Image (cartoon, rainbow, N blue to C red):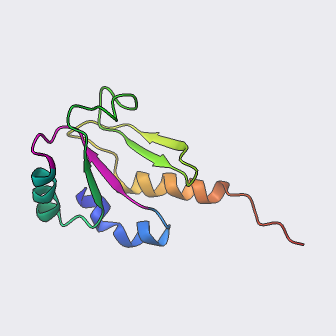
Amino acid sequence: MVQLHQKAAQLQAADAQVVCVFREDQFGVDGLKQIQQRTQAGFQLLSDFGTKATAAYSTGGLHTYVIDRQGVIQAVLEGQKTKRPLAEKVLAAISRLDDAKEPALAE
């Protein structure tokens, strides 16, 4: 999260939104507030303690998903609690989305 926070300007320039979903935080909203204060994260933090919503996506690790504007997962960056994907890898995956956009049709 610290790396993502450090790359906030680049993420914003790429028109990307960052949402972090915590599955291990048993303290709910209070825990998220503490995490936000500790990390100074400028993005949305959500809790899914018990993995009710996220179990279908990630059962064994703490993965990062790059999702396009239509809600389709375009990249899965695998990670573990102690080794999450680097912010540079997230930015590269977002950049590939921009590169894959079809050019505007000229009339």
Q: Is residue 68 above or below residue 53?
A: below
Given residues 105 and 5, the one toward you in this image is 105
x%, y% of residue 74?
54, 44
x%, y% of residue 43?
30, 63
* Quadrant in which residue 34 is drawn: bottom left
Tell me if 59 is positioned left or right of 17 in this view: left
Residue 24: in magenta span: yes
Q: Residue at (14%, 56%) from the top-left corner?
A: 35
Q: Residue at (9%, 45%) from the top-left corner?
A: 27
Q: Residue at (90%, 72%) from the top-left corner?
A: 107
Tell me if 50 is positioned left or right of 78 in this view: left
Tell me if 24 is positioned left or right of 20 in this view: left
Number of marks in the rendered image: 0
Q: Quadrant of the N terminus?
A: bottom left
* Quadrant in which residue 6 is drawn: bottom left
Given residues 83 and 14, the one toward you in this image is 14
> Looking at this rendering, what residue extends furthest in the right direction?
107
x%, y% of residue 84?
29, 44
x%, y% of residue 62?
29, 37
Q: Which residues are magenta?
A: 17-28
Q: Residue at (33%, 29%) from the top-left corner?
A: 55
Given residues 21 and 77, the one toward you in this image is 21
Q: Is residue 46 above or below residue 10?
A: above
Residue 67: in magenta span: no
